[in-house]
Image (cartoon, rainbow, N blue to C red):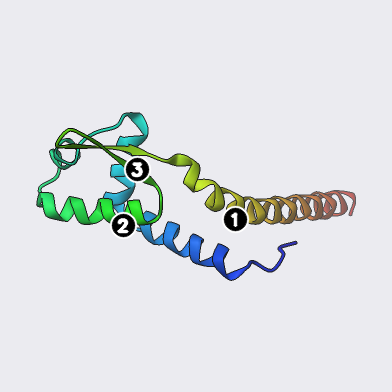
Amino acid sequence: MMGVMVATDSRRLDHLFHALSDATRRELLMTLAHKPASVTELARPYTTSLNAISKHLKVLEGAHLIQRRQIGTRHQISANLEALRPVDEWITVYRKNWKASLESLDRFLKRRSRKGESS
């Protein structure tokens, strides 16, 4: 089962889940997963201001989900998908429990069905 999570891991997950909780931030991250882009390129499809997109990027950056690299006067932003590893590990614990529970339910229903057929 699940061990006790240390406080720093919990804070890390809080930052990640907060960053991922907004649809615009998830879309930005998905865009960056395909290729790096500038803030202006990222903002182009949105009706919100460049400032609003920059704020979303700061949240993603604070969660270490993106990285900025300055090339001349331009900031090149890329995804850091490795930062999602703690989320994947956290979900894996629950996935194992869900799978075990569903397998147990399946066995129970099959036994019950066989008993009903033999009656």
Pointers 2 and 1 in contact (CB under 8 A)? no
Say which mark, if any, is on residue 53.
none
Depth check, front residue: 51 or 91: 51
Say what secondary structure mark 2 lies in: helix
Percent x, y of residue 88: 56, 48
Q: Indicate the quadrant containing the C terminus: top left, top right, bottom left or bottom right.
A: bottom right
Identify the residue at image location x=55%, y=52%: 86
Q: How many marks?
A: 3
Q: Nearer the viewer, mark 3 or mark 1?
A: 3
Label 3 Cα crowd, 10 Å radius (few <14 / some 14-19 / many 20+) = some
Q: Amino acid at mark 2?
A: Val
The reply to whether residue 48 is in sight is: no
Residue 83's place in the image compared with 37, above or below, is: below
Amino acid type at image mark 3: Gln
Numbered badge on residue 67: 3
Whether residue 42 sits left or right of residue 20 in the image: it is left
Residue 98's spot in the image, x, y percent?
A: 67, 55
Find the residue positioned furthest to the right. 118
Amino acid under label 1?
Trp
The numbered mark, 3 or 1, whose residue comes first in the sequence reads 3
x and y, in percent, of residue 74 in the image: 17, 36
Please give the residue where the numbered disc 1 appears in the rendered image: 90
Task: Give the mark, 2 or 1, whose residue is nearer the N terminus.
Answer: 2
Mark 2 or 1: the one toward you: 2
Q: Does 103 sit above or below residue 44?
A: below
Q: Is residue 96 left or right of residue 53?
A: right
Q: Secondary structure at mark 3?
A: strand
